[in-house]
Every structure is written in structure tokens, then in C-alpha cells.
């Protein structure tokens, strides 16, 4: 006997296998999209962490300029010594303020706490520990700051965190 068609069982098996294949492909596409979004958020968080370090360096360097101009009452660490518990600042701030655990907003391509814009999922915390490098430590000269910036955000019900750290020094006497 010559069988010229598919049996019902063969059709059901073929549909089942095609369905499994399509579901697998869709699952892979979904995971790729999720991974891409998370990677994009990590990249933004890394830039925000580096920006936090640059904010601290800018404040320190502004202090050095004021010392050079012989402005009274300015030390190299002015405005930076009260951040052991965490501070926050916008990219254009000249001082750090105690952290209020706020979300950064994005407005015209800039991430900031103040101003208008759309709230982002990112929070930034800048922590500064000052160290005495004299040998033995005498407590009279603070020479080094350990700056740590932590960016945290929640995405798809998971909390993520990126941390950047750098030591900055009193490079001018």
C-alpha cells in the first residue's frame, strides 16, 4: 500500500516540534532584550559613578585655586570632610550635601537632582574617607581621600549596584 499523506499523529508531532522551536526562539529573544537593557543601565551607572568622582576632584581643585588666590579659610578639603556617611551632588555643584537617598532626574541629557526632568531609577551616594599619610600619623596633615561612589537602581524587581573608587591626594602645598 502506498501512503501518500500524513497521518493525524504525524501532523500533531510536527506542530508540537515547531511550537517548541518557536517558543525557544522567543525565549532567547526575550532574554537578549532583558540583557541588553541591563547592560545599558550598567553603562549609565558606570558613567554616573565616574562623574561622582570627578565632582569631588573638581571641588578639591577649586579649593586649590582659592588657596592660590589666598582666599582666607579655604583648605584643600573644604566641603569634602563631612561625607563619611554619604553625600550627593549634581555635576555642576561646588559643594557636597548630605545624601537624601533621592533619585537622579534626567533633563536635556544631564543627570541631576535639581531642576526638572524625568525621574530615573538611579541613586548616587558619594562617600569620602580622609587619611593621614604622615609616618607615623600625626593627625595634623590630612593627605589623602578615599572617594567611593555607589550607584544603585532597581530594574525588573532586582536591585543592581555599581561602585567606583579612587584615591585623591593633596597634591599642592
Image (spheres, rainbow, N blue to C red):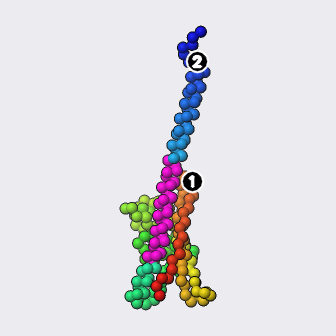
The single residue placed furthest to the right in the displayed view is 136
Closer to the N terminus: mark 2 or mark 1? 2
Number of marks in picture: 2
Is most of the magenta stretch helix, strand or loop?
helix
Task: Look at the image and say whether residue 84 sits in the magenta stretch.
Answer: no
Q: Residue at x 47, y 75 (%)?
A: 56
Residue 172, percent from left and from top: 46, 85
- Residue range highlighted in magenta: 33-59
In the image, residue 66 sits, relative to residue 48, either above or below, namely below
Q: Quadrant of the N terminus?
A: top right
Q: Which of the 4 image quadrants contains residue 69?
A: bottom left
Q: Residues within 10 Å of mark 2 (few under 14, many from 20)?
A: few
* Residue 82 in sight here: no
- Residue at figure coordinates x 51%, y 43% from the top left: 29
SS type, badge 1: loop
| Above-or-below relation of 32 to 9 | below
Compared across the picture, whether 151 is left or right of 62 comes to right
x then y, percent, for residue 167: 53, 75
Queried whether the magenta region covers residue 36, the answer comes back as: yes
Q: What mark, if any, has residue 7 been given in the picture?
A: 2
Q: Can residue 161 be spotted in the picture?
A: yes
> Which residue is painted at 43% across and 70% down in the image?
91
Secondary structure beneath dot 2 equals loop
- What percent of the width, then of the height, locates residue 109? 39, 61
Q: CA distance from mark 2 to mark 1?
A: 47 Å
Task: Identify the mark at residue 157; answer none if there is no mark.
Answer: 1
Q: Is residue 102 above or below residue 78?
A: above
Q: Is residue 157 above or below residue 113?
A: above
Amino acid at each position: 500500500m502506498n501512503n501518500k499523506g500524513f497521518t493525524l499523529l504525524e501532523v500533531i508531532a510536527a506542530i508540537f516540534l515547531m511550537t517548541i522551536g518557536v517558543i525557544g526562539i522567543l525565549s532567547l529573544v526575550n532574554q537578549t532584550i532583558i540583557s541588553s537593557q541591563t547592560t545599558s543601565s550598567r553603562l549609565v551607572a558606570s558613567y554616573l559613578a565616574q562623574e561622582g568622582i570627578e565632582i569631588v576632584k573638581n571641588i578639591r581643585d577649586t579649593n586649590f585655586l582659592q588657596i592660590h588666590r589666598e582666599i582666607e579659610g579655604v583648605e584643600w578639603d573644604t566641603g569634602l570632610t563631612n561625607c563619611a556617611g554619604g553625600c550627593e551632588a549634581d555635576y555642576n555643584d561646588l559643594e557636597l550635601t548630605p545624601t537624601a537617598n533621592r533619585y537622579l532626574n534626567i533633563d536635556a541629557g544631564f543627570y541631576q537632582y535639581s531642576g526638572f526632568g524625568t525621574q530615573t531609577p538611579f541613586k548616587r551616594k558619594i562617600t569620602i574617607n580622609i587619611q593621614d599619610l604622615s609616618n607615623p600619623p600625626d593627625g595634623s596633615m590630612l593627605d589623602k581621600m578615599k572617594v567611593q561612589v555607589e550607584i544603585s537602581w532597581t530594574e525588573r524587581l532586582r536591585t543592581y549596584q555599581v561602585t567606583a573608587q579612587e584615591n585623591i591626594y593633596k597634591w599642592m602645598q
